[in-house]
Image (cartoon, rainbow, N blue to C red):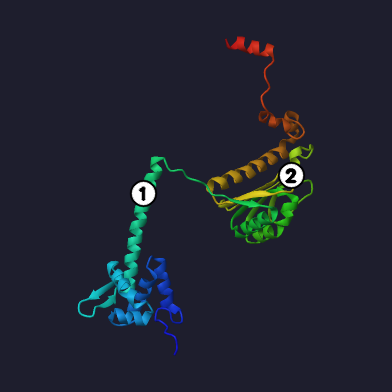
Amino acid sequence: MPAHRSEATAGGGPADDFATALLQLGFSHHEARAYVGLLASEPRTGYAVAKATGVPQPKVYEALRKLVARGAAFELAGRPSRFVPVPADQLLAKLESTFSDRLRVARRSAAELRADGDVPTYEAVRRLEEWPKIESAARATLDRARRRVYISARVDELRTLQGEIEDAVGRAVDVVALCFGKEPWVVAGVRTFTHASTDKILYRSHQARHLAIVADSAETIWALATDGHNWSGVVSDSALVVAAIKDFVRHDIDLQRVYADFGDELKRAYGPALEALEDYRHDPQPAAPEAARVAAEAAG
C-alpha cells in the first residue's frame, strides 16, 4: 500500500514552500501544515485536516485552535467543528503590520537604552591568521570593489594580488597603490606611489611586511608580519576601522608626495630617511641638573 503523502508536503512545490515560510515567520510545524491544508479546500474538520496534511490527529485540533487564536483561521459553529482559513494575503498583511509595530517598539527601546549611556557598543573585526587566509580575504575584497581601492604593501604582495587589481581596473575601479620596495611596480590604470622616504637607511622594522586594503570606504583588511614571515590580520566593515586604515594609507601617500617635491629640504631638517621625525616616540631624557635649575628659576 503506498505511503500517505500530505497536501502540504507532497512533491514539495508552492505549498511546501509556503509552509516553510510560515515556519520562518513563527508558526509551529503543525500550525504551518494545518494552515496550508485549510487553504486547499472548503471548510474542514480537524479529522479532514489531519488526513490531508499528515499532522497527527491528537495534535491537529491544538494546531487549529492556535491558528484561530493568532487570527489565521476561523472556527465555524456546529458539530463537528469546522475551520476556514483567513485568506493568505490578509494573513501576511497582518503579520507584516504586527512585525512593523514590534520593530518600531524595538527601535525606540534601543534608542532609549543608547540615550542612557549605559549600554556598551562594540565594533566587530574578524581575525585572520597565516598568509593564505589573508590572501584569500584580500582577493575577495578586491573582487567586490566597485568604486575605489586604496592598497598599501610591498612589491611581493602587490604582485600576488595583481590579477585581482587588474580585474578591478577593468571594472573602472579607481585603484590607488602605495608600493614599498626598490623594485618598480607598474600596472596600467593604477595610480601608484612609491614609498621613497626610507630608501637611504635600513631600520630593524624594515623586515616587517604589511598589507592594507580599503575598498569603497566600506570594508578593510589590515595585516602585518612583524618578522617578515608570520602573518596575522583583521577584516572589518566597521566605519570607524575602515576610516582609520584609509587615513593611514592616505597620510602615508601624502607624505611621499611631499617628500618627492621637497625631499632635500626635509632631509636637511630630519635626516636622510626623515628619522628625526620619530624623536617624539622616544622616552624623554631627564634634564641635566644645571638645565633643570635654570628652568626652575625661569619658572619661578
* Viewport quadrant of the N terminus: bottom left
Q: Which residue is mark 2?
A: 227
Q: How many marks?
A: 2
Question: Is 29 displayed left or right of 140 in the figure?
Answer: left
Please, what is the three-letter code of the amino acid marked with disc 2? Asp
Establish if 121 lies above or below 103: above
Task: Measuring from the top left, give residue 235's x and y in whole percent.
Answer: 60, 51
The residue lying toward the viewer, choosing from 2 and 266, is: 2
Task: Measuring from the top left, give residue 63's x and y in whole percent.
Answer: 32, 72
Establish if 284 lies above or below 198: above
Q: Residue at x 78, y 38 (%)?
A: 202
The secondary element bearing badge 2 is classed as: loop
| Of callouts 1 and 2, the N-terminal one | 1
Establish if 244 lies above or below 64: above
- Give residue 68's mark: none
Q: Which residue is mark 1?
A: 109
Question: Is 142 displayed left or right of 207 in the figure?
Answer: left
The residue lying toward the viewer, choosing from 7 and 279, is: 7
The residue at the far bottom in this view is 1
Q: Residues within 10 Å of mark 1 (few under 14, many from 20)?
A: few
Task: Measuring from the top left, give residue 20's x and y in whole percent.
Answer: 43, 71
Residue 235 visible within the image: yes
Please, what is the three-letter code of the amino acid marked with disc 1? Ser
